[in-house]
Image: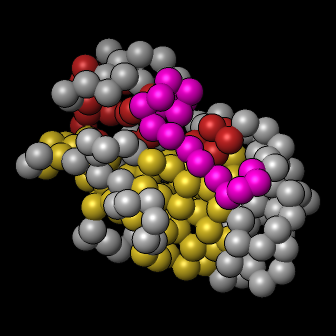
Amino acid sequence: EEAAETHDARTASLGEGLSFIYERDFDENGVLYFLGTGEKESVAQSRREWVNPAETGVVSVTMMTPPAFSGNKNGAISHTKQRLRSKARRNAWVALDLGPLRKLVTSHYTIRHGGLANEAPLRNWELQGSNDGETWETMRVHVNDESLKGDYATASWPIESIIAYRHFRVFDITASAVQLSVGGLEFYGCLH
């Protein structure tokens, strides 16, 4: 019960949406954590052990074709360490669909590297948003970003956006073929 109270103190209702406030990487304040603990009308009612929401069909994860990932694609949104890597290719991506009834105005996002330190951590990528899964808008660009150092390293970044999106994509922009290695994502902001 104390954990639920702490979570609620950091999550407030904003008009028609719920606000999810970033404190630290993969905390219990994120949107995917909320969806994985049983989405209810309020955060206080959402209290069960976390289950990956892609495994229960609450959200969906897709990836480039052919996917050729080492690991389960749903590991891309895991809250636990997941080994998840693609074969080397250009323009590799992994995407999240919150579903037809949800959109998020993003304030922060977190990524976990999907492997060991020497296994192609992300360095050059874009976080993209979309409402139809076809037309993508760049939300943040990372060039030579070395934040993801170490085995299953995590890092978070603020996003300055006022647009609510249903779909999110991590899109590698490296000029040469590289492995995409994403072993966890989390999002913060106002969920509608």
User: Which residue is depicted at the point 47% across and 28% down?
Assistant: 57
**Residue 151 to residue 132: above or below:** above
Residue 26 visible (yes or no): no
User: For this view, does 73 lie left or right of residue 36?
Assistant: right
Which quadrant holds residue 100? top left
Say how the picture is coloured.
Answer: secondary structure
Is 48 displayed left or right of 42 in the figure? right
Residue 76, percent from left and from top: 63, 45
Q: Nearer the viewer, residue 44 or 69?
A: 69
Instruction: Examine the image and state in which quarter residue 38 appears.
Output: top left
Of residues 64 and 56, the one nearer the viewer is 64
The image quadrant where one finds the N terminus is: top left
Tell me: residue 14, above or below residue 46.
Answer: below
Magenta-tinted stretch: 52-67
Q: Is residue 12 above or below residue 147?
A: above
Residue at 64% across, 53% down: 63
| Residue located 46% across and 65% down the image | 134
40 magenta-colored: no
